[in-house]
Image (spheres, rainbow, N blue to C red):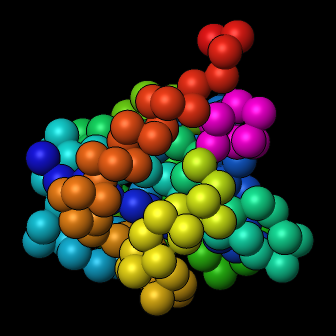
């Protein structure tokens, strides 16, 4: 099993609404197409964007399909009309849990940057898909489980 971070930019796409209203989801695969496998674990990362949303991991899921060309399942959530309806390589992800705020148990980028300053997403912020080293993936998975809100 491999761990991934897939990034979404709220300046380009309404990621919060997408994660609240869709499951499973389809996510663009721009990097590592030949390495992504069914049953890999993926953490969904919300970039900060111009509106200064809090960046970090806001969802966890399992990859259900290999990368393949497919239609967008929520074209209306794109803020740039040119992105709508593109048939591009994507994977289908079953979202296991979504946490859009610190109160809900998201993992803030600042916390991860303190622990893993060499995480690829901090070096190449414009990519979409980041493969995690096994120790990074296991640690982030444990942290995700530890941040479950008390009232859940």
User: Left or right: 44 with respect to 32?
Assistant: right
Instruction: Return the residue nearer the eye: 121 or 21.
Output: 121
Q: Is residue 45 above or below residue 126?
A: above
Residue 151 lies in magenta, yes or no? Answer: no
User: Left or right: 140 with respect to 35?
Assistant: right
Q: Is residue 52 visible?
A: yes
Q: Quadrant of residue 61?
A: top left
User: Left or right: 6 with respect to 19?
Assistant: left
Q: Residue at x 22, y 65 (%)?
A: 133
Residue 93 place in picture, x, y as percent: 36, 42
Instruction: Return the residue nearer the eye: 138 or 91.
Output: 138
Instruction: Return the residue nearer the eye: 9 or 1.
Output: 1
Residue 103 lies in magenta, yes or no? Answer: yes
Which stretch appears magenta?
A: 99-106
Q: Is residue 140 above or below residue 7?
A: above
User: Left or right: 137 with respect to 103?
Assistant: left
Per the picture, the main secondary structure of the magenta-coloured stretch is loop
Q: Residue at x 84, y 79 (%)?
A: 50
Q: Residue at x 60, y 59 (%)?
A: 111
Question: In the image as oriented, which residue stretches furthest toward the right?
Answer: 51
Q: Is residue 24 visible?
A: no
Residue 116 place in picture, x, y as percent: 43, 69
Q: Is residue 74 above or below residue 90?
A: above
Could you tell me which quadrant the C terminus lies in? top right
């Amino acid at each position: 099993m491999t761990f991934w971070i897939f990034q979404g930019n709220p300046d380009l796409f309404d990621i919060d609404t997408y994660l609240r209203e869709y499951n499973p989801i389809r996510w663009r695969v721009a990097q590592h197409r030949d390495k992504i496998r069914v049953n890999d674990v993926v953490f969904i990362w919300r970039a900060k964007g111009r509106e200064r949303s809090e960046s970090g991991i806001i969802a966890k899921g399992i990859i259900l399909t290999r990368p393949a060309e497919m239609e967008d399942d929520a074209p209306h959530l794109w803020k740039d009309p040119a992105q709508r309806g593109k048939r591009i390589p994507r994977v289908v992800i079953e979202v296991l849990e979504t946490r859009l705020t610190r109160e809900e148990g998201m993992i803030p980028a600042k916390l991860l940057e303190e622990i893993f300053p060499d995480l690829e997403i901090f070096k190449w912020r414009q990519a979409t898909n980041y493969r995690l080293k096994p120790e990074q993936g296991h640690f982030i998975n444990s942290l995700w489980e530890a941040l479950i809100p008390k009232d859940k």
